[in-house]
Image: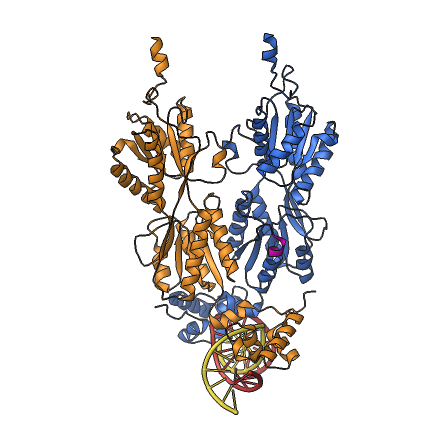
Chain colours: A orange, B blue, C yellow, D red
Amino acid sequence: MSRRRITIKDVATRSGVHASTVSRVLNPETRGMVSEALAQKVLAIAEGLGYRRNPLASGLRTRRSYMVGVLIPDLSNPVFPPIVRGIERTLSANGFIAILADCANNEQTEQAMVENLQSRQIDGLILATAHRKDPVIEACLASGMPLVLVNRSVARADVSAVVNDDELGIRLALEHLTGLGHTRIGYVGGPQSTSTGYDRYRAFLKVARRIGIAVTPEIIVNAEAFSEPAGKQAFLRILESGKELSAVVAANDLLALGGYDALAARGQRCPDDLSITGFNDMPFIDRCQPPLTTVHIPHDGLGVQAALLLLERIADPDARARRVRLKPSLALRGSTRRLDATAAALKPRPARPAARART
Amino acid sequence: MSRRRITIKDVATRSGVHASTVSRVLNPETRGMVSEALAQKVLAIAEGLGYRRNPLASGLRTRRSYMVGVLIPDLSNPVFPPIVRGIERTLSANGFIAILADCANNEQTEQAMVENLQSRQIDGLILATAHRKDPVIEACLASGMPLVLVNRSVARADVSAVVNDDELGIRLALEHLTGLGHTRIGYVGGPQSTSTGYDRYRAFLKVARRIGIAVTPEIIVNAEAFSEPAGKQAFLRILESGKELSAVVAANDLLALGGYDALAARGQRCPDDLSITGFNDMPFIDRCQPPLTTVHIPHDGLGVQAALLLLERIADPDARARRVRLKPSLALRGSTRRLDATAAALKPRPARPAARART
DNA sequence: ATGAAAGCGCTAACAG
DNA sequence: CTGTTAGCGCTTTCAT
């Protein structure tokens, strides 16, 4: 069935002009070189024939593929779909396509995928992988490939990146809690090998000190992973540390959910016994019990900005690297509550003031 | 910086052979034409030079791009990320890449994206868009493009598709409920313009009749969309229909969540006043309150199978269309409960048996 | 078994 | 303004 595709040559013979003239007409940049009348005629014929340019062929010549690689550590992590969506929409609107690659959090795979993408002549690469040390970045930079990082920072300043303002996020969470009267506030962080884990941890230290919260080693526990089980373990440690905390800032929504589990395991409840804030505002986290108060990250915006930054760099590869920091906001929900004098302390055992009164 | 990429010609001059020989060596299919010794030598040199084949160039010649289009209606719908992930992993493992396109549920956009993908010489297309009537399918078929549908069925039998066994899913839900003693069971469905909405509705009619549930128009409401608000509206209608139902099967988890909202608005609770089952088992739905009993769909498996089916068709375009139907399972959680004689009827007003006993 | 030559579809020098 | 020519990197006849 599938008849041979219409080529530029077909249009040329039908129009009675040379192929290169057709090429000039079809390319917006060179359209001006051709007389308006002829251009219109050729355009009409191309349209009539249903001509579609073959980007592979033109790319072979121009070394432009109008393809961008998008490397994600794990699409099943709910923060990434909206980022990818923002990226894809923006690229698509600018005539580019997104090649999706999911490296399943595996550095080996990541390396291989980047090489594969490079060999496919992608015009640029968006990296959303999370590790702070990442040889792939050096390799990309060395090869001159336009590169933008999203949702992760990196030490060196010569690479473009779009990140959430994690310090602001932590500050929003902390100020919310102090505004509710909390003073003994702990922190459950993420793995320090990840950029978000590290950044938020640093931010907590900085903001907590500035606000005047006593920062001692016991009130801070960094979880092994950004997951519910790891969060539960971390919360259990912090709850059993002996420090009587009334609130905990978690570096991630999943960790916060782990906090719910930890409380449940101890026969305690959120927010009655402990206020908890999350980070990310992942989809449907407002439907859990209690609805999680969390730092909302504009994920779609991260994706859009990353795509725009990359397009900019593709257009001008010599442009300086830029960093964009997007502002998060606080999603106020039910996992935090005002600390009143009577329910002040979090007792290790459910020895509520009311119970004590009976003795 | 970016030194010119190594081409097949570079390898040729270094090896002292002709480019075509290198090509033969590098291509597994034609490797046999070259003497083993020479092949080894060329391979070593190519390796040493860091040669990477340029798929654009070879594709131009062979009309194979090793690229597959993946068209999604909306990546922010939580059912799709796992499907996409399964697709991507499988394609990638077979030397293909996935071009992701999100048409935002817009048919216009869908049409344009498919054309764009086709012009980019994709070897095949995976469609996850949901509408039952879809001119894009005809167009693809007509053009001879290998095509696989995922998570959606279509009337005509000559198109490959991977779907969940919705009838089994509905049966699992219904049998679970009847097993708990429910007999007055309603159904909140999805939009009939979508394939899943339609299929599950038909399945409910069929299975309910077979099981012996009285199917009257009042106990069935199809929502306007697969969303929480639409679900809430539909549940309100069914609850106010006058039929005293003790359980409702929802065609989708979001609709079920809307059911929670509807109950809450009426001062009732799930599962005490109404048992509800969902469909999809989307991520974190087990964390809502109450945890939703729902039909679990193997989304990742859908993606994997779709990719495999497409690869098969790409390898042999004349192969017959195949349909794969994957089996769902029931995720038993807290939104359904045994119907005991005392709490049998769902009263419009909270006139609980216990309360009545006191009078 | 290997080399030579042609060409996939398109663009970019270079002429005229 | 438009046609001619060459070539992007690779594969594939066709010779030898």
Q: Is residue B105 magenta?
A: yes
x, y (%) of residue B154?
A: 69, 48
Q: Which residues are magenta?
A: B102-110
Which of the two residues, D8 or A172, is positioned nearer the viewer here? A172
Residue A2 image position (x, y, % from top left): 67, 65
Residue B21 in sight from this viewpoint? no
Q: Is residue B222 left or right of residue A29?
A: right
Residue C14 to residue B161: above or below: below
Residue appearing at x 56%, y 36% in the figure: B281
Judging depth in this view, the residue of A306 and B151 nearest the camera is A306
Residue lying farthest to the front in this orientation: A179
Quarter containing the N terminus of chain A: bottom right
Q: Quadrant of residue B140?
A: bottom right
Classify residue A100 as left or right of residue B253.
left
Query: Which residue is at the front of the view, B356 or A7?
Result: B356
Viewed as shown, does residue A163 lie left or right of B342?
Answer: left
Vertical relation: B291 (above or below) B226: above
